[in-house]
Amino acid sequence: MIIQSTQVWINDGFQPGQLEIAGGRIEAVLPYGEKPVDQDYQDQWILPGFIDIHTHGWNRCDAGKPTVEAMLRWQKHMPKEGVTSFLATTATQSAAANEAALPILKEAIEAQAAGAEILGINMEGNFISHQFHGAQDLYTIVKPDSQQLLHYQNLAGGHILTVTCAVEFDEDYAFVKTAVAHGIRVSCGHSGASFDQVREAARCGATGITHCGNGMRPFHHRNPGIFGAALNLDELYAEVIGDGVHVHFETVHLIGTMKGAEKLILVTDSADCKDDPDYAQFAHEGAFRLPDGTLFGSALYVNQGIDHLHRQARLPLVTAIRAATINPALYLGLDGRKGTLEAGKDADIVVCDEHIALQAVYCRGQLQSISE
């Protein structure tokens, strides 16, 4: 199959071109008009498929309490956001609940079902701060425990790719060092860590910041803390929830400007209540709040988030697009097959207009249903 457009996102910019697709991969990137095409998208944008590394669920599909059937529904939904791959993200819950969930997530990942690909697991809990727990379960938080993490990784079949940690409680940064040694990326978050503690965690191998601006000690000009570290340490990727509610768009502008086009990652942090009509009463301005006002997840779609980063947060288009494509792929070490439109990579492709309204989505070369 060959598709083409005058606006194909190659080398961080648009140019006319064709994509030749076979066996779920991009076989070649060709000059515009080089070969007869199966689908001519004319002036529509052709972008790499979007990647959401921090999403807990959708419409009664919950990564923390998964079923195989629910995971299949979730995978089929995700292309409606332009998402072609994602991390199933667990939150803080009992050890027994984690032990029940992880083998099911392993089964879903290895099934290679239709729709968006589940790349692996993101554990946002349980190794976080009580003080900055947000909407996470206060009573099942534990100190960073390397052996517990490895136990979970064994149950998950090696599919845990990232874990959030309040590094101020990680004695001698043993948790960070162990996770990194076993190929698990450590993201600092739900934390009151100081600037120096985050910097030392980064020296020990931590590479990310979980939903920057949320679940952390606020920035102070004499105590920059984890937020200041997120912005100033060039080696750290920073997630941002791009709904304008979790983080004000002017703050998103600051985060994106400081991290640049290379280290910003757009996430939704969506929960299983997203698109569930039973939770409509908790939705306010595109996010969900507990009765006390605590945020507990966004209703954001990733394609909307990209447009928000560019138009509402006033970030360059290249920053907005990279935040949902190559940057998460680089962070996960999966840039060899995800994140850009290049020969040899998976044919994960989004066709959209200039407002990122979806026209077509391909997951590993298969055209997806994106209608409601």
Image: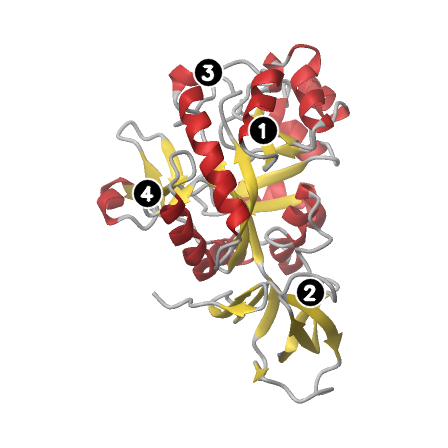
- The residue located at (55%, 53%) in the rendering is 85
Which residue is tagged 2? 341
**SS label for mark 1:** helix
Pointer 2 local density, CA inside 10 Å: few below 14, some 14–19, many at least 20:
many
Q: Nearer the viewer, mark 3 or mark 1?
A: 1
Marked residue nearer the N-terminal end (4 or 3): 3
**SS label for mark 4:** loop
Which quarter of the rendering shows the N terminus? bottom right
Which residue is tagged 4? 273
Inter-mark Cα distance, 2 to 3: 42 Å
Marked residue nearer the N-terminal end (2 or 3): 3
Q: Quadrant of residue 84?
A: bottom right
Q: Who is closer to the viewer here, 316 or 29?
A: 29
**SS label for mark 2:** loop
Which quarter of the rendering shows the C terminus? bottom left
**SS label for mark 3:** loop
The answer to whether 57 appears left or right of 267 in the picture is: left
Q: Is residue 158 visible?
A: yes
Which residue is tagged 3? 130
